[in-house]
Amino acid sequence: MGSGRVRVPEALAGRGGERPLPTFDVPYFKYIDEEDEEDEWSSRSQSSTEDDSGDSLLSDRYVVVSGTPEKILEHLLSDLHLEAAQDKETETLLDDFLLTYTVFMTTDDLCQALLRQYPFIKWKEDETDVSCRKRKVLHLVSQWTSLYKDWLHEDEHLKQFLKTIYRNVLDDVYEYPILEKDLKEFQKILGMHRRQITVVSLFPPPHPSQNKTFFHQFSLKENWLQHRGTMNETEEIFCRVYITEHSYVSVKAQVSASAQEILKIVAEKIQYPEEELALVTVTFSGEKQELQPNDLAISKSFESSSRMFVYRKDLTDSLNPFAENEELQQRSVRILGINTWDLALELTNFDWSLFNAIHEQELIYFTFSRQGSAENTENLSLLLQRCNEVQLWVATEILLCSQLCKRVQLVKKFIKIAAHCKAQRNLNSFFAIVMGLNTASVSRLSQTWEKIPGKFKKLFTELESLTDPSLNHKAYRDAFKKMKSPKIPFMPLLLKDVTFIHEGNKTFLDNLVNFEKLHMIADTVRSLRHCRNNQFVPSKEHHELKPYVHHLHVIDNQQALFELSHRIEPRV
């Protein structure tokens, strides 16, 4: 089983004979036997005796199975060590909780719960215990803000909470001088100075009698995932500028990009004079509006819920759409003149910039959010979209090449690029290219594949073996595990793993949080961290390659791809 475990008390672990399972208030703990997992997910406190006629209860581990959010938080705080380094179990339990708390409580809920855990009543408790509890709360908050970095920087509840807790520490540091060190550490992490903190109204702590009801209410909820806010003008997205109904140029641009900037990129991509083109928004009802050079193109298309098209201007300045594939008839195959290693490097540079921007929380939101809150998964969505577009790009490039000899060169080129992506530990583009070559409309090109040299066919077979889905993608998993970081995983498979855990296990058991499920999810999500242990150092930029790789021209309609496939190699 995973971490999130606490040690068995020696009084229980060291005695022979019959060993009853201990009774605890929630969170509930249970002995876990690796060979007997039938009752592994039990969340009830057990006091009955179980004799497994062997050493099945000699395990020296507990597992946090389930509990109310407040009790899990209480247990977590009680287990924290302040002076010594955390043991692995406590460290993992803390990380599990912070990574997955949004599944069963809102950020505001967590802020309120932490304020309740920060002791105010001093005369009823030992002074050392009070200062220790205060420091543990501060330590957890520091870990939380460090893990989330700027993810919650716009959350008003967190802003208010941080000011409140900071003010409390300032008030307490005179009575508890030991808090001074924690205060300085808190200032560093938050980037705050005492003079910068404005006086804020404190959260009124709920009456103790309300706590149980309060936590019972939100322990029943699964869809607490809250939105981070709307995109700002400096954020980059992929926007699609359609050439025809079924082909588009994927443009990575800022939300504030002008129509002129977008048009320049598209004109270069389709090798057409910019002055003869116009950017047009077309609504689903067919209404057209030409965008002026300084118009905010992306904002305009969002406002009208329309798609952006590029049209041709004739001598009278009337707008004419491109016919399907018409603009591509005289298109040169630029990729044949590009060095394959350099192209793979540029793909890797681009993919890394997308992958490195993904916050671990995005995988949690992607899996649990039923509204599909795009603003909470924007970086993850960009990488997934990129993977899909690279696959379509491979097929598009090959199927738009009408000359057999050049098409053979193109297939060889993509096989080499896939091999280079693997060597550069970019498994996202590697998978996309191999899947693009295996697209039905490409794999049916028998004349093309017959002319591929034997050594390239052998290489492609070896590359294909890594994408073999049998035994739960064992070939890929084994190969990826051996690769050192930095490395880029095949993100759709990672999401599949998280979704499989989510759909195969209940989030709540008898109104208690199934924390072992959340541990498994957190453990899978943490793989992002391992991939980014060492920072990726981008290679020297090839300025002529950058726009080619950043803005891919693809056909996103399978029927259109098949029509092209049958046109260049008709069925015999």
Image (cartoon, rainbow, N blue to C red):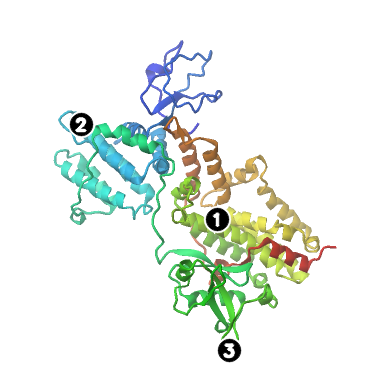
Q: Position of residue 374 (x, y in %)?
A: 47, 55
- CB under 8 Å between discs 2 and 1: no
Identify the residue under disc 3.
Answer: 316
How many angstroms separate mark 2 from mark 1 (CA)? 51 Å
Tell me if residue 569 comes above or below residue 140 in the rendering. Answer: below
Identify the residue under disc 2.
Answer: 128
Disc 1 marks which amino acid?
A: Leu
Tell me if residue 65 comes above or below residue 416 in the rendering. Answer: above
Q: State the mark number for residue 322.
A: none
Tell me if residue 536 comes above or below residue 516 in the rendering. Answer: below
Q: Quadrant of the C terminus?
A: bottom right
Q: Is residue 520 left or right of residue 427?
A: left
Disc 2 marks which amino acid?
A: Thr
- CB under 8 Å between discs 2 and 3: no
Q: State the mark number for residue 384.
A: 1
How many angstroms separate mark 2 from mark 3 (CA)? 85 Å
Tell me if residue 482 comes above or below residue 398 in the rendering. Answer: above
Q: Is residue 406 left or right of residue 418?
A: right
Q: Secondary structure at mark 3?
A: loop
Pick whichever of labels 2 and 3 is earlier in the sequence: 2
Pick whichever of labels 2 and 1 is earlier in the sequence: 2
Q: Position of residue 504 (x, y in %)?
A: 55, 36
